Amino acid sequence: MSEFKPATPFNVPGQYFKCTETMVKGTLKKVYDEIGTTFYCSFRSFGGTERENNGITVVEDTATIETWYDPNLTTNCKVVIGGVNYEILGTPENVAMRNKWLRFKVRAIRGGA
């Protein structure tokens, strides 16, 4: 059985911010830490992900991140890489349950009215 090895080196700096959810007037509000934790990763976007929405093809800005295992990096964290905010899709995968590598998919957070 071969051991998992990352495809590219962890040379992309990023930060993650832990989230605290609070109930404000019956609405769940996310509040992120002001100071993030720096980590290094490999960041691969492959041009995003195409999906169809109401008959219109939309390209979402998605990427795959591989990094060293960190139990504090969870679904509730916001990841910032290159000044772009990303949300973690699904649960980060602890590769082979060895607490050595972490792999997860992210989607850019878009704002606006």
Image: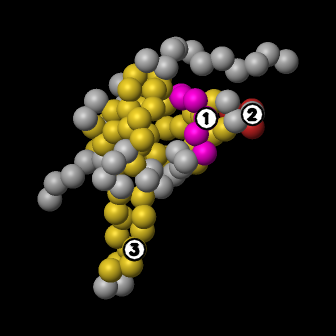
Does the magenta portion include 103?
no
Q: Which residue is mark 2?
A: 98
Can you tell which quarter of the image residue 60 is in? top left
Three-letter code for the amino acid on which mark 3 is drawn? Thr
Q: Residues within 10 Å of mark 2 (few under 14, many from 20)?
A: few
Task: Give the side of residue 77 with respect to residue 86, left or right.
Answer: right
Q: Nearer the viewer, residue 97 or 52?
A: 97
Total count of labels: 3
Three-letter code for the amino acid on which mark 2 is drawn? Arg
Q: Residue at x 49, y 30 (%)?
A: 65
Q: Residue at x 85, y 18 (%)?
A: 1
Q: Residue at x 67, y 30 (%)?
A: 100
Does the magenta portion include 67?
yes
Q: Nearer the viewer, residue 21 or 53?
A: 21
Q: Is residue 28 above or below residue 111?
A: below
Q: Are marks 2 and 1 in contact (CB under 8 Å)?
A: yes
Disc 3 versus disc 1: distance between alpha carbons?
28 Å
Can you tell which quarter of the image residue 2 is in? top right
Q: Is residue 4 visible?
A: yes
Q: Is residue 29 above or below residue 46?
A: below
Label disc, if present, on residue 22 of the rendered structure = 3
Report the span colored magenta: 66-71
Disc 3 versus disc 2: distance between alpha carbons?
33 Å
Q: Is residue 20 above or below residue 91?
A: below
